[in-house]
């Protein structure tokens, strides 16, 4: 089975974290998002991976190379982002049999991809609390007979979960008309397959599309909980590790530090002295969490620093972010309502009662800065000493 992995989008809803990092390469536990997809495909029996790349695609080439997990890897470049069917069509020259299509920013429960690969054609399906936001699948006698996009009054709660196995003939069905939203949609290819073949469903028990910053937090909460604890780095003095904690080779945990897992401290990171790390937290490579700093349920990407006397809760810090001494991140509203964040110009609920800030590459705060819940700091943004930041910058 060939697996086409879609990894070419710009990830504009994930800004500013995708300023220099393609969304599929954002970190989820011990690997990029897309590596979770690739690993699941290899474990399910894929004999070739074809990555469709675009924005910052060289990062994906560098990570996966010409072979990954013992299977060959090829690449197709999508020069313009014209939809999912267009992305797969860019990989057409590599396809010579039945093929799977997987989103490089989706995570699935264990066994899902293996079940999907058990035969063709097939589509992953998920029971959604609110199916009006998805393509709803109509099922008769166990087979898919229709797909209705975002219906006002859906007949079912079974929705399209965005993973497919197509027959070899679908290679010639990828040139579908442009939809009303200006894209060539893979669901139109699925509709053709439904007309021509019997399409089975594979119902998934867990599925997460990682499209917005708070979903990256959720993805890490999920995948960090699956890690097995180990200590390959250096733990000094009276430092205490509680629960599932991974300290990679080259990482240092100093005296007086308490780490309550699930937590992953990556190579080159330095924690402490006298720091507190708790919740589902990822401390990336070469990060520094210093004296008197508390980090809770957060993602610190490579090279991010919180050196002195700061609190970071439910937040995402991009590469090279530096928090001045005494920076305090607020992560809870006084009215206890869900925190909102601006995404592509719109204020959107995160549906999270506790949510801190998102800081882009190289953002810096002055000493004693206060950041309110849901604030976004653009790449390279700075704050003044003692400033209270209540709006994005």
Image: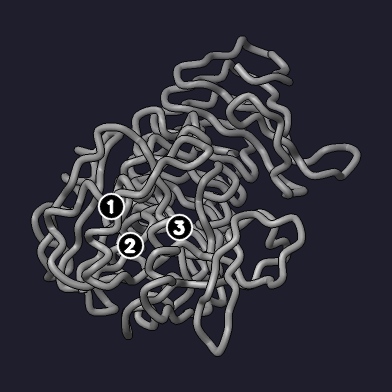
Q: Is any part of residue 279 visible from this angle?
A: no
Closer to the chain start, of discs 2 and 3, is: 2
The reply to whether callout 2 and callout 1 are in contact (CB within 8 Å) is yes
Indicate whether 254 appears above or below 199: above
| Residue 187, numbered label | 3
Between residues 63 and 312, which one lies in front from this camera angle? 63
Residue annotated with mark 2: 101
Tag 2, which secondary structure? strand
From the top left corner, tell me how far across and down residue 144 is, in percent.
51, 77
| Mark whose residue sits in front, 3 or 1 | 3
The reply to whether callout 3 and callout 1 are in contact (CB within 8 Å) is no
For the rendered model, the colour scheme is: one colour
From the top left corner, tell me how far across and down residue 332 is, in percent.
78, 41
Q: Is any part of residue 26 visible from this angle?
A: yes
The reply to whether callout 2 and callout 3 are in contact (CB within 8 Å) is no
Closer to the chain start, of discs 3 and 1, is: 1
> At 83% across and 38% down in the image, what residue appears?
333
Task: Determine whether, in the image, residue 378 is placed left or right of residue 198.
Answer: right
> At 51% across and 46% down in the image, what residue appears?
211
Tag 1, which secondary structure? helix
* Quarter of the image that includes the C terminus: top right
Between residues 11 and 91, which one lies in front from this camera angle? 91
Task: Determine whether, in the image, residue 229 is placed left or right of residue 152.
Answer: left
> At 27% across and 37% down in the image, what residue appears?
54
- Badge 2, how many Cα within 10 Å: few under 14, some, many 20+? many
Measure the C-alpha gap from mark 2 to mark 1. Answer: 8 Å
From the top left corner, tell me how far across and down residue 299 is, in percent.
50, 46
| Residue 88, numbered label | 1
């Amino acid at each position: 089975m060939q697996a086409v992995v879609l990894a070419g989008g710009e990830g504009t809803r994930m800004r500013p974290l995708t300023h220099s990092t393609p969304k599929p390469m954002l970190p989820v536990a011990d690997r990029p998002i897309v590596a979770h997809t690739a690993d699941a495909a290899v474990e399910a029996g894929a004999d070739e991976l074809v990555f469709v790349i675009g924005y910052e695609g060289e990062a994906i080439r560098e990570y996966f190379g010409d072979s990954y997990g013992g299977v060959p890897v090829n690449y197709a470049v999508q020069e313009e982002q014209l939809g999912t069917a267009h992305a797969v069509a860019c990989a057409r020259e590599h396809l010579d049999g039945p093929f799977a299509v997987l989103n490089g920013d989706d995570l699935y429960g264990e066994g899902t991809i293996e079940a999907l690969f058990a035969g063709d054609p097939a589509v992953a399906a998920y029971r959604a609390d609110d199916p009006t936001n998805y393509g709803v699948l109509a099922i008769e006698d166990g087979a898919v007979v229709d797909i209705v996009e975002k219906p006002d009054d859906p007949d079912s709660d079974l929705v399209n979960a965005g993973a497919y196995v197509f027959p070899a003939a679908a290679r010639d069905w990828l040139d579908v008309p442009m939809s009303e939203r200006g894209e060539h949609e893979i669901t139109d290819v699925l509709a053709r397959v439904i007309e021509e073949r019997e399409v089975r469903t594979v119902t998934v028990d867990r599925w997460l599309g990682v499209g917005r910053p708070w979903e990256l937090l959720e993805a890490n909460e999920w995948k960090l909980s699956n890690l097995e604890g180990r200590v390959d780095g250096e733990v000094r003095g009276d430092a205490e590790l509680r629960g599932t904690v991974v300290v990679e080779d080259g990482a240092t945990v100093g005296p007086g530090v308490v780490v309550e897992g699930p937590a992953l401290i990556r190579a080159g990171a330095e924690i402490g002295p006298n720091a507190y790390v708790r919740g589902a937290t990822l401390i990336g490579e070469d990060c520094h969490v210093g004296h008197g700093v508390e980090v809770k349920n957060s993602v610190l990407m490579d090279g991010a620093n919180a050196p002195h006397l700061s609190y970071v809760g439910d937040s995402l810090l991009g590469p090279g972010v530096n928090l001045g001494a005494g920076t305090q991140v607020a992560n809870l509203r006084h009215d206890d309502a869900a925190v909102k964040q601006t995404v592509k110009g719109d204020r959107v609920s995160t549906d999270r009662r506790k949510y801190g800030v998102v800081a882009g590459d190289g953002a810096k705060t002055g000493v004693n800065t206060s950041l309110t819940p849901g604030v976004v700091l653009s790449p390279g943004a700075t704050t003044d000493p003692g400033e209270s930041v209540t709006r994005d910058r």
